[in-house]
Amino acid sequence: MSFHHLALATTDLAATHRFYTEAMGFELVLVEGAGTDVEGAWLRHVFYDTGDGSLLAFMELHDDRCRDFDAAISRGLGLPSWVNHFAFAVDDLDALDAARDRWLRTGHDVMRMEHSHGPSIYTEDP
C-alpha cells in the first residue's frame, strides 16, 4: 500500500499556503469544501503535491467545536516542537542547500544537523 496524503488542521490557512508554496515549493493541486457532521459547519480542504505525487493536505475548520485549538502537534501534546515532525527527501546536497536558501529567503530560521543517515535541515511551519 502506498502513501497518498497526510491531512492536518491549520488555524491560519493563508500562512500555511504561503509556507508550503513559497518556502517549500509545493504546488497547490486541489481545494475543496465539505460539510462536517454539524449542521451549518464546514471545512476547506487544500492539497499540495510534495513533488512525487504524494500529497500533504490541510483543513481550515469552520465549526464551533474547533475554535482556539493549538494545531502544532507536539506543542498540543506538551512535547518539544521537534518531536513530531515530517521529513521530505531531496536528491542531493545541492538540493538540500537550495531548500535551505529558499527557507532563509522566505524569512524562516533554519537549523542543520548531521545524522548517521546524512545531513538534515529543519524549520517550522506556521
Image (spheres, rainbow, N blue to C red):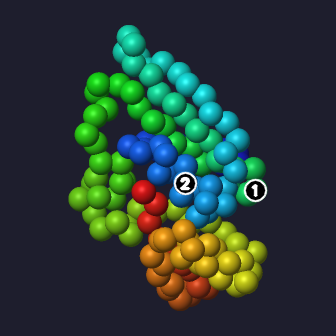
Residue 46 position (above or below residue 80): above
Q: CA distance from mark 2 to mark 1?
A: 20 Å
Say which amino acid is labelled 2: Arg
Quadrant occupied by the C terminus: bottom left
Instruction: Give the camera-side residue of 33 and 79.
Output: 33
- Contact between marks 2 and 1 (CB within 8 A): the answer is no
Please, which residue is most extreme toward the top here?
39
At 45% from the left and 22% from the top, the residue drawn is 42
The residue beneath circle 2 is 18
Left or right: residue 98 compared with residue 84: right
Q: Local crowd at mark 2 within 10 Å, few (<14), some, or many (≥20)?
A: some
Q: Secondary structure at mark 1?
A: loop
The residue beneath circle 1 is 52
Instruction: Give the camera-side residue of 62 and 7.
Output: 62
Question: x, y percentage for residue 79?
Answer: 28, 63
At 73% from the left and 83% from the top, the residue drawn is 94
Residue 81 position (above or below residue 29): below
Q: Nearer the viewer, mark 2 or mark 1?
A: 2
Q: Toward which corner of the image does residue 18 lie, by quadrant?
A: bottom right
